[in-house]
Image: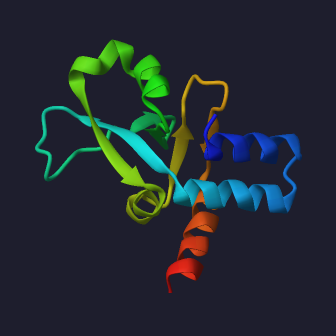
């Protein structure tokens, strides 16, 4: 279990206690992510693999290759990997996107648009 997964577990176990939640957000900002992109495009302009369901947009992201490999098994020949820091991910993501962290793992977590906005505000505090 990495620092982000551990912080998420503690936040969930605390039933949303604000200090634990803030710690999870901070670990998200500090983390490095593996993001699936379409294989047919150039490395200089990758096309991120968003998932759509009922007018909602989801972005699958992973913290380790084990989680990624389990998720991507059936589409591995159609995708490539993009690695981004938490800060870069937050800078580049759209406003109405839900980030799905480590889909299918014991430490799966969806970050909704309000959580993404909160983490962006934390980044602005740290880097301004």
Residue at the bottom extreme, as displayed:
128
> Residue 112, position in %: x, y?
61, 50
> Residue 67, position in %: x, y?
49, 25
Image check: 70 left or right of 115? left
Image check: 25 left or right of 95? right
Residue appearing at x 60%, y 64% in the figure: 119
State whether residue 95 is above or below residue 16: below
Identify the coloring.
rainbow
In this rendering, does residue 115 appear at all? no
> Residue 102, position in %: x, y?
54, 32
State whether residue 71 is above or below residue 81: above
**Total residue callouts:** 0
In this rendering, does residue 36 appear at all? yes
Pick whichever, 18 or 98, lies toward us: 18
> Residue 104, position in %: x, y?
57, 22
Residue appearing at x 54%, y 39% in the figure: 100
Residue appearing at x 55%, y 38% in the figure: 101
Image check: 49 left or right of 112? left
């Amino acid at each position: 279990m990495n620092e982000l997964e551990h912080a998420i577990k503690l936040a969930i176990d605390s039933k949303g206690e604000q200090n634990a939640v803030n710690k999870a957000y901070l670990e998200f900002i500090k983390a490095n992510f593996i993001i699936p992109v379409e294989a047919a495009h150039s490395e200089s302009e990758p096309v991120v693999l968003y998932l759509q369901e009922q007018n909602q947009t989801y972005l699958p992201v992973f913290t380790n290759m084990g989680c990624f490999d389990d998720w991507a098994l059936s589409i591995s020949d159609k995708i490539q990997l993009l690695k981004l820091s938490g800060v870069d991910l937050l800078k580049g993501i759209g406003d109405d996107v839900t980030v799905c962290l480590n889909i299918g793992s014991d430490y799966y977590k969806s970050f909704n648009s309000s959580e993404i906005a909160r983490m962006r505000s934390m980044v602005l505090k740290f880097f301004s």
